[in-house]
Structure formats: C-alpha cells, structure tokens
Image (cartoon, rainbow, N blue to C red):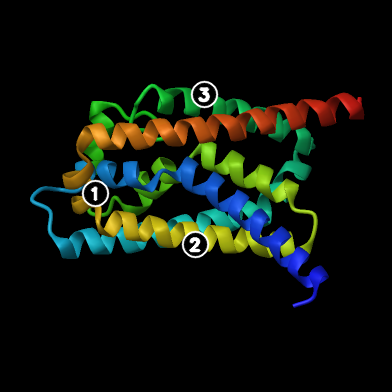
C-alpha cells in the first residue's frame, strides 16, 4: 500500500469511526434493551425477544437510510438552510445529553403511563414505539441529517452508510441479549453507561452548534 493509499484509508476509517461513535451514543442500544423488556408482555421468552430485536433493527436500518437519502431533499423543498439544521440539531442533542448525564435512561421521547400500557397491549412493539421514536427519534434524525451534510465525497457517503449498517447490527445484538445486559449491568450500570454516552453526545452537540453558527455568520 502506497503512502497516498494509506493516508486515504486512514482518512476514511476516521470518518467512519466519527459517524459510528456518534450514532451509537445517540441510539444508546443498551438502554433501549431495558426499555424493550419493559414494553414486552410478560413473561418474556427468547423467541419473542429475538423476533422483536430483528424487526426493530430492520426498521431502524430502513428509517436511517431514508433520512440520509431523502432528508436533505425534504429540507430543500421547505427552503430550510442546512446550516440551520446543524444548529437546531445540536441544540436537540445538547438537551438529550443533559438528560443522559443526569443518569436518565433515555427514551428519546417521554412516554406517559397510558402510552406504556397501550404499547404493552399491542401485538408488535418493534416498529412503534421501540424503533420509532425510542431509537430513531429527533436526536437520531438530527444526527443523521448533519452527518449527511458533512459528507464531502462518495467515500464519505459510503462510510456513513457503513456506519449505519454496523450500528444496526449492534442494536440487534444488544436487543437480542437484552436480558443478559439488564441482569449484569442492573440499573446502576445502565446509568453509568448513559452518563458516559451523554458526555460524548454533548461534545458532538457542541461541535454541531458552533459549526452551524459559524457557517450562518459567514453566509449572512
């Protein structure tokens, strides 16, 4: 491998790693695993958990790809500046990160007692509310849109698609092994992980806000 090829590979790998860390921290699949167990009708069984994990992961993958492919087009239809999305996306992520740092098990959206009861009564909770909006909520949507805006080349876009696929696989593994995670980590462990991820989300949010404001300032 020539020095130029080595440099390009390292650059693409760093881009992929940046996308992957951002997606996994905002998706927070381990916390989603605990939420899934709270929504599945008791008593749970491995076959049911595996089915829900598979359908949820497929939904997350399709929804994420649709956001990346069509999100920017929809923004242009409404005349929304892409830099404005960076700012509002960063603010949304900052609010989520504050809740995460406080140790909350993030559901991306809050559910009332009635909504939880309704979710349990549904035959299938894999698409709604588990995939959308628990996993793919406002924070995930904003993150994907900003990541798409940041892609500068075809290789960057490939790195983003690959990051989405890998993140979906991680979500599937986490949901499939939900009972193990909850038993081993317990509530204290889940809160520690959530706090650590909250710090990372907050750092990403700060970058989004600063970059967005800077671009808008230069534009106007």
Q: Residue at x 36, y 37 (%)?
A: 193
Q: Residue 45 got which mark?
A: none
| SS of the residue under disc 3 | helix
Distance Cα–Cα, label 1 vs label 2: 19 Å
Residue at the extreme left of the image, as rendered: 43
Residue 133: percent from the left, percent from the top? 43, 41
Q: What residue did someone put label 3 on? A: 95
Q: Earlier in the sequence, mark 1 or mark 3?
A: 3
Residue 82: percent from the left, percent from the top? 76, 38
Q: Quadrant of residue 107?
A: top left
Distance Cα–Cα, label 3 vs label 2: 26 Å
For the residue carrying disc 2, how many other residues have a C-alpha within 10 Å: few (<14), some (14-19), or many (20+)? some
Q: Earlier in the sequence, mark 1 or mark 2?
A: 2
Vertical side of 116 occupied by 29: above or below: below
Q: Quadrant of residue 220?
A: top right
**Whether residue 117 is visible:** no
Vertical side of 109 occupied by 155: above or below: below
- Camera-nearest residue between 58 and 34: 34
- Camera-nearest residue between 155 and 85: 155
Quadrant for the N terminus, please.
bottom right
Residue 32: percent from the left, percent from the top? 33, 44
Q: Is residue 33 left or right of residue 20?
A: left
Q: What residue did someone put label 2 on? A: 166
Q: Residue at x 31, y 32 (%)?
A: 191
Residue 201: percent from the left, percent from the top? 53, 34
Q: What residue did someone put label 1 on? A: 181
Distance Cα–Cα, label 1 vs label 3: 26 Å
């Amino acid at each position: 491998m020539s020095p130029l090829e080595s440099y390009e590979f390292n650059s693409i790998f760093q881009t992929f790693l940046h996308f992957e860390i951002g997606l996994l921290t905002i998706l927070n699949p381990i916390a989603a695993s605990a939420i899934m167990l709270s929504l599945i009708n008791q008593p749970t069984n491995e076959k049911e958990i595996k089915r829900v994990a598979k359908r949820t992961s497929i939904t997350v993958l399709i929804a994420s790809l649709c956001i990346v492919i069509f999100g920017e087009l929809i923004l242009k239809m409404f005349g929304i500046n892409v830099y404005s999305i960076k700012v509002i996306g960063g603010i949304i992520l900052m609010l989520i990160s504050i809740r995460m740092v406080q140790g909350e098990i993030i559901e991306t959206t809050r559910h009332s007692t009635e909504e939880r009861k309704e979710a349990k009564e549904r035959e299938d909770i894999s698409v709604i509310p588990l995939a959308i909006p628990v996993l793919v909520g406002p924070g995930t949507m904003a993150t994907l849109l900003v990541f798409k805006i940041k892609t500068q080349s075809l290789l960057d876009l490939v790195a983003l698609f690959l990051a989405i696929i890998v993140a979906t696989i991680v979500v599937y593994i986490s949901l499939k092994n939900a009972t193990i995670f909850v038993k081993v980590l317990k509530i204290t462990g889940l809160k520690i992980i959530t706090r650590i991820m909250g710090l990372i989300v907050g750092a990403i949010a700060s970058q989004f806000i600063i970059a967005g404001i800077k671009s808008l300032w230069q534009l106007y």
